[in-house]
Image: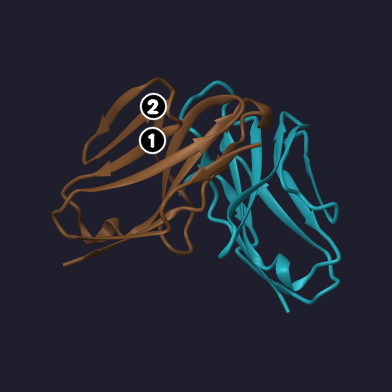
Chain colours: A brown, B cyan
Amino acid sequence: GQNIDQPTEMTATEGAIVQINCTYQTSGFNGLFWYQQHAGEAPTFLSYNVLDGLEEKGRFSSFLSRSKGYSYLLLKELQMKDSASYLCAVRDGQAGTALIFGKGTTLSVSS
Amino acid sequence: DSGVTQTPKHLITATGQRVTLRCSPRSGDLSVYWYQQSLDQGLQFLIQYYNGEERAKGNILERFSAQQFPDLHSELNLSSLELGDSALYFCASSVRGLDYGYTFGSGTRLTVV
């Protein structure tokens, strides 16, 4: 089976940097994904890691350590529009190519 | 527009009833995934189809079933509905081997009263 943990809520201010952590346990790891979801809307893809290390994409970066079962999403220069839920998901070979999601971290950005 | 189309957007029905949710994947995508999202459970994987065949099952109840048709659209059938089935149901599609995760439709909000 799979187990994915991430904090339930985080708060930050505009212009700041925030790091959202995710730990996972899975029997057949085949990639880790981060999605952003605004309330009532569909999740949208942010990043993908399959090898250890940091992937940078504009204001967003994602890090993976497979040996520790750990990932984080780093958001820089926070904007009000970044207020959303951030979902960590792993692809487990035992679930086909399906992504298994954590419960998400709700980020509130204030001015 | 993500290219994944889900209908209807909203559905209100009574307990004990049966409903069908429809999903059309992005052009060229062979895999379709169904997810249920409720406030307390997060995004739960239900079932995956690939090119018409069931590929993987998640936490799908026996009252729920799905299929993928030759034109690759998929339907999720929910029967004997209970209040607890009220949730957002998302469909997503992907191309095999493309490591971008996948693309979600805008969802169907089901309310069971």
Which residue is located at x 38 percent, y 27 percent?
Answer: A65
Instruction: Read off the residue under disc 2.
Output: A65
| Percent position of residue B53, x then y | 78, 30
Density class for disc 2 (Cα within 10 Å; few <14, some 14-19, many ≥20) is: some
Which residue is located at x 21 percent, y 41 percent?
Answer: A59
| Percent position of residue A17, x then y | 19, 49
Does the rendering let one see residue B28? no
Residues marked 2 and 1, same chain: yes
Tell me which amino acid carries mark 2: Ser
Q: Identify the image quadrant of the C terminus of chain B.
A: bottom right
Q: Left or right: where does residue A110 sit relative to residue B13?
A: left
Tell me which amino acid carries mark 1: Ser
Which residue is located at x 58 percent, y 43 percent?
Answer: B92
Residue furthest toward the left? A15
Q: Left or right: where does residue A95 sit relative to residue A76?
A: right
Nearest the viewer among B43 and B99 is: B43
- B50 in relation to A52, above or below: below
Element assignment for label 1: strand
Q: Chain of mark 2?
A: A
Nearest the viewer among A86 and B34 is: A86
- B106 in relation to B55, above or below: below
Q: Quadrant of residue B31?
A: top right
Instruction: Read off the residue under disc 1.
Output: A71
